[in-house]
Amino acid sequence: MTSLITSDNTVTGGAASSFTTWNPTYEMDVKPQIASPGGNILSTWPQPLGSYAVISGTSMACPLVAGIYALIADVRGTFDPATLEALIASTANPRFYNAGTGNANVFAPVAQVGAGLVQAYDAAYATTLLSKSYLAFNDTDNLDMKLSFTIKNLGKSTVTYKLGSVGAATAYTFSDSIYPDLFPGLEVTDEFAEIKLPSSVTVRPQGSAVVTVQVKPPKLDGDRLPVYSGYITINGTNGENLSLPYNGAVGSLYSTQVLDTGYLSTSADPDLNPLTGNATFVLSKNANATFDVPVAVALMAFGSPSISAKLLQVNKRGTKNLGDILDSPYAYASRDPYPIGFDGRLADGSYVPAGEYMFSIEALHIFGTAKKKKELGCCCFGSLYY
């Protein structure tokens, strides 16, 4: 006989789990946008393993939100993604910041919880619809000081909406390393941005009003890339209390180092440890053959819109750049170690002859363009034979 024993979580209950995914994206969009229960969830499990289990993670949070989306779509009679996204975000419940030791007296960064904890019933029956699910003021280089959104009144009576703003904790991306700090342990501050917007708007039934929001970012150390955030509050005389999350960064995403270094490994090593000295590989053009291939591992300190792996042929006069290898460049690489295998083919599908070669790894900066200078590092070398 199996029984379930539970105990109250008095430290982090109702707050973001320590392993939750933080946003924003590298272009400063708010993703993920909402928080959902996902820690210690009782759910179904493969029958040979007991049929039921208590587990944590996106495997629990995502299906819950998917079900909520389906219920809201059924109630409202629409599957329009933008409409459902705006409803779920605007009715979500912001959470207090919790670093694993109890709630602080400041809202959690939007970078941690997005719009807040999803509220299914409120999203299904709200009669106020916002045109956006978040405002992204971007970084210092690309600052959008003024952004607008629309409030639409879907009800049968005129509604006056009282507008305001509340700041959330600012989180520093870096401290003393080119790698972002990890949570728990990163530094947060209660220094907020200044927000200007109208004090109220009145919207007739089936009417709409445009609201313009102006931001003045906090004066913080841009080299550490602090991400500030908060919520635009929208409280209507119809009893609906909505919020619109916003974020921005102090500093330059373009100037942030994305590529740390790289090294040569082999597909024969599942842990992709660095090889020492020169390495020799015997490759085959036979598609059915089994052989080990060289793997260039790029250590990414930050995400990159594009990683390019080029092959340099070594000769007596130096090196000759043969261009990208097969499948290169690679789009939207995360800051994790990025393995790039080479089976002897270039981007056009042709095989290179036996000889000595070097890998060259190029990583594009955030907001960079391929026509501008890239961060370049010659990461590894070896001899290839067929």
Image (cartoon, grey):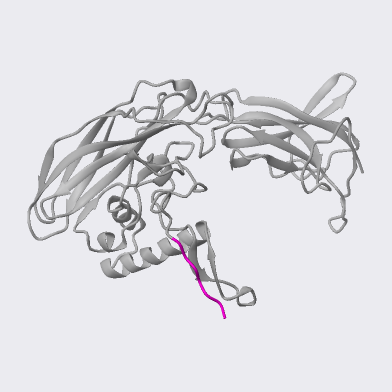
| Residue 381 image position (x, y, % from top left) | 83, 31
Q: Is residue 39 magenta?
A: no
Q: Is residue 110 left or right of residue 314?
A: left
Which quarter of the figure is the C terminus placed in?
Answer: top right
Q: Is residue 2 magenta?
A: yes
**In the figure, residue 234 lies in which quadrant?**
top left
Q: Is residue 85 above or below residue 246?
A: below
Q: Is residue 289 left or right of residue 74?
A: right
**Residue at x 80% of width, y 26% of height:** 320
Magenta stretch, main secondary structure, is loop
| Residue 308 image position (x, y, % from top left) | 66, 35
Q: Is residue 153 above or below residue 228?
A: below
Residue range corresponding to the magenta coloring: 1-7
**In the figure, residue 197 lies in which quadrant?**
top left
**In the figure, residue 229 lies in which quadrant?**
top left
Question: Can residue 358 be seen in the rendering of this structure?
Answer: no
**Viewer-nearest residue: 106 or 295:** 106
| Residue 186 image position (x, y, % from top left) | 49, 33
Which quarter of the figure is the N terminus placed in?
Answer: bottom right
Q: Is residue 317 left or right of residue 170?
A: right
**Viewer-nearest residue: 164 or 132:** 164
